[in-house]
Amino acid sequence: MADEVVLLDFWASPFGMRVRIALAEKGIKYDYKEEDLRNKSPLLLQMNPVHKKIPVLIHNGKPICESLIAVQYIDEVWNDRSPLLPSDPYQRAHARFWADFVDKKIYEIGRKLWTTKGEEQEAAKKDFMDAIKLLEEQLGDKAYFGGDKFGFVDIAVIPFYTWFKGYEIFGNINTEKECPKFVAWAKRCMQKESVSKSLPEQEKVYDFIVQIRKRTGIE
């Protein structure tokens, strides 16, 4: 019997993008269901009753919540192709550490760049660039975070690149000027079909940010 794979998602979610990339890397066909986050579907509330958030990967009727957990699940279940996590236990733990760093730093700090002003925004700008510089240092001269092959940490980080236009315009920063190796890595990732077809254009995400700012009175 063929696997039934469903993804409950929202197009602009960097967390959902992770799962989309992982599924594309593995060549897994799935049914994509776009969620209205202001009017969540009964299926989403049923499949993720704890957090009531996307993305939710549903495999043969069973839900897997939280993006990094879903990516690891995809790697373990479809382990016969395109490994995402290293086989070495230490390297695998190391990859999980940096993916967790991205969750705790990049998302929240990046959000502050377009939702705050004044001293709070200035502090966010410094924190954001410090975090990107740490990632750039971790990348070093490697093609990808894990070495020569695109993998778990790359999947954790690259979706946020779609939000960079909004970060840079509203935060008044220039990531490429300060972290050229990081941006070169991002552009390298974007050349991969699994990434380019899974991520929206920066311009579309920027317009989405503008709409949120107007709706919430930030403008």
Image: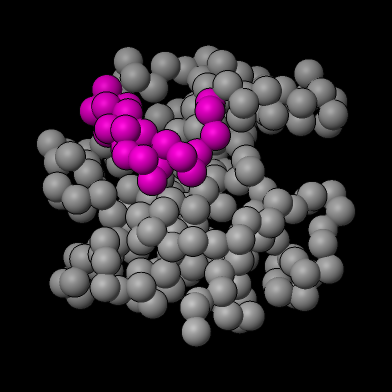
**Residue 21: in magenta span:** no
Which residue is nearer to you in this view: 36 or 144? 36
**In percent of the image, x 32 and y 33: which residue is there?**
191
Q: Is residue 150 above or below residue 203?
A: below
Write the start and end of the magenta stretch as one range. Answer: 180-202
**In percent of the image, x 50 and y 76: which residue is there?**
3
Q: Is residue 4 above or below residue 210?
A: below
In this rendering, would 58 be left or right of 153?
right
Q: Main secondary structure of the magenta part?
A: helix
**Residue 200: in magenta span:** yes
Asked whether residue 172 is in view, the answer is yes
What is the x, y in percent for residue 209? 68, 28
Here the colouring is: one colour
Quadrant housing the C terminus: top right
Which residue is nearer to you in this view: 31 or 17? 31
Taking the view exactly as shown, the residue that stands out farthest to the bottom is 1
Quadrant location of residue 111?
top right
Which residue is nearer to you in this view: 182 or 191? 191
Asked whether residue 64 is in view, the answer is no
Q: Is residue 204 above or below residue 111?
A: above
What is the x, y in percent for residue 79? 30, 74
What is the x, y in percent for residue 210? 72, 23
Which residue is nearer to you in this view: 164 or 172? 164
Quadrant location of residue 206?
top right
Q: How many marks?
A: 0
In this rendering, would 82 be left or right of 28?
left
**In percent of the image, x 83 and y 68: which residue is there?**
42
Quadrant location of residue 214?
top right
In this rendering, would 43 be left or right of 82?
right
Taking the view exactly as shown, the residue that stands out farthest to the front is 1
